[in-house]
Amino acid sequence: MGRWFARFLLSEGKEVIITGRNEQKLREAREQLPRVEVATSVEAVKGADAILVAVPMDSFEEVVQQVQPYVRPRQIVMDITSTKAFPVEVMHKYIKSGLVLGMHPVFGPGASSVANQNFVLTPINEQENALAGKVKAYLEAREARVTMMSPQEHDEMMAVVLGLSHFIALVSADTLLSFDSLKQMKAAGGSSYKLLLTLVESVIAEAPEFYASLQMTLPNVAAVEELFQRRVKAWADLVKNRDGQSFVRMMSALRDKFEKSDPDFRKAYHNLYRVVDGL
């Protein structure tokens, strides 16, 4: 995602300086993005108007601590990690002169632009609210969708938005690979199966360390997944017991709840085919 944002900012006409501790990754980034400058972390911080921290969670505090002495008053420091309470706390712990803001781009590096992508900003004081307002206006002018909430609210929501969706993909992958006919199922599968398989393969194709980090750090994710398992058992029992009437009643109740919470609920079926047709 660091490279993705470097590419995006270059396309916006910005000057971009990148830094990092992995020399091989820096060389790769330099080859992919010939217009970026490469510098040491100290030089990068000193030469930047704004700093975007894009590092794994297990090295986040160390990196912030390393650059903190060189942050200038009012210099902007933002992070793009997938959790927010811990990174925001760390930035406030070490960065006293700069202006910090937590940001979560809720998409992956496969996105072609920020248009129609979700961002969450997590300001915690007046100064950060003002900065968040400017960032929100900037992103929305490029057709992104921006939400603001507290770091704690963000992490609780991500336990479902990311934690549960990834968990479903991983368990589905494990289930599908228990059969010896994955290739045949792909050839014969309908739209719902194609969408499920796309979710499964997109998650499995990414770095396991990233998904492990989310599962281990998101608050209450274990409780969310335990609730999911209880719901799975309840529905599986209906099928096992051939209780068609209860199945219909429960599915109808779910439909009614979705209709009340989402005015566009009925468009989902057509949206499914729009997505699948693009695969």
Image (cartoon, rainbow, N blue to C red):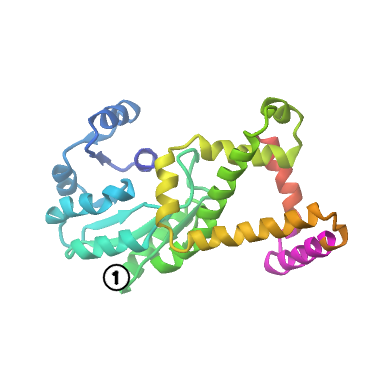
Residue type, label 1: Gln
Q: Is residue 163 above or below residue 35?
A: below
- Report if residue 199 lies within the magenta region: no
Q: Is residue 38 above or below residue 66?
A: above
Q: Position of residue 274 (x, y in %)?
A: 70, 42
Q: Position of residue 237 (x, y in %)?
A: 75, 56
The residue closer to the viewer here, 215 or 198, is: 215
Q: Is residue 13 visible?
A: yes
Residue placed farthest to the front in the image?
A: 241
Q: Residue 123: name its quadrant.
A: bottom left
Q: Is residue 148 visible?
A: no
Residue placed farthest to the left in the image?
A: 69
- Report if residue 252 lies within the magenta region: yes
Helix, strand or loop: magenta stretch: helix
Q: Quadrant of the C terminus?
A: top right
Q: Position of residue 276 (x, y in %)?
A: 69, 38
Instruction: Give the magenta part as a residue range.
Output: 247-265
Q: Residue 9: name its quadrant.
A: top left
